[in-house]
Image: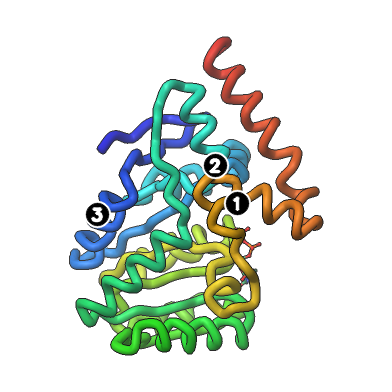
Amino acid sequence: MDRVKLLGCEIDTYTFDGAVEKGLELIGEDKVSQVVTINPEMIDCAGADVNFAEILKNAEMVIPDGVGVKIGLKILGYNVERIAGIDFAKKLIEKCSEKNLPVALIGAKPEIVSQACEKLKEEYPSLNIVYSHDGYFKEDDEVLNELKNSGARLVLVALGSPKQEFFINKARNILPFGLMVGVGGSFDVWSGNVERAPEIFQKLGIEWLYRTVTQPERFKRIFPTLPLFVLKVVKEKFFG
Ligand code: UDP
């Protein structure tokens, strides 16, 4: 596995299975590890905020979630597999239920996170969810202490980016162990409140296109980002 650089951010080039294997290895270690599922908006954010850039640099795994990252790396000559964060996280949940490893979910609205837990328990009856909390808390320390006492080995954090990455970074100094993954809007999907794009869109890596068309408010946020991001990569490639 290599780390490649895209607009100043280092990104890991795992296959999906390789990423899951690495994730499981980190879950078993006696230290906290951070997984960042990176997209063009986050790369832009790292360019503007040194603290965020430092978090990305120190993350044990940075996996290319957005199709924009895949396109950017392709322009630089790297052919990497896009790993959707939501699929990666779900696979880890499945593995944790098989191995009876304790799991925690933090983020989203209160009813969403509890519905997501219920649905996951239906799908994986032996899943051991030891802690869950919504994502609208004021005191990080309170949640982090409860999380510490829970003994979770896999912690999924759905606060949106960059909030979830900062929260996970803080947890590094408090928890004794655990693999912590920023999962964005995944709980909304698992709770059954937000539909994923049809499989054909997922397979073609154009889930973003489906979401942009069906949720016009995302269009404003995402549309200028992607072409501008591609332009920046082209500029870096040819003009340094
Ligand atoms: N969210 C949260 N606390 C906050 C802000 C957002 O728990 O203070 C949740 C929100 O409810 C949603 C998730 O973060 O479930 C991700 O939001 P979004 O879809 O904007 O993130 P993205 O996947 O685009 O990074």
Up-down relation of residue 88 to residue 113 (above or below): above
* Residue tagged 2: 67
Return the residue found at the far front: 200
Label 3 SS: helix
Foreground mark, 1 or 3, reads 1
Foreground mark, 3 or 2, reads 2
Q: Which mark is residue 177?
A: none
Label 2 SS: helix
Q: Which residue is painted at 28% across and 79% down in the image?
A: 97
Mark 1 and mark 3: Cα distance apart in space = 25 Å
Let me know if residue 144 appears in the view.
yes
Q: Quadrant of residue 33 in the image?
A: bottom left
* Residue tagged 3: 22
Determine the quadrant in which ligand 1 lies: bottom right
* Residue tagged 1: 207
Expressed as whole percent of the image width and height from the top left, the position of residue 3 reads 33, 35
The three-letter code of the residue at mark 2 reads Val
Expressed as whole percent of the image width and height from the top left, the position of residue 86 reads 47, 62
Asked whether disc 3 touches disc 2, contact meaning CB atoms under 8 Å apart, the reply is no
Relative horizontal placement of residue 171, taking residue 142 as reference (left or right) = left
Expressed as whole percent of the image width and height from the top left, the position of residue 175 reads 32, 72
Foreground mark, 2 or 1, reads 1
| Sequence-first disc among 3 and 2 | 3
Q: Which residue is painted at 58% across and 61% down in the image?
A: 163
The three-letter code of the residue at mark 3 reads Lys
Relative horizontal placement of residue 161, taking residue 26 as reference (left or right) = right
In this rendering, the count of numbered labels is 3
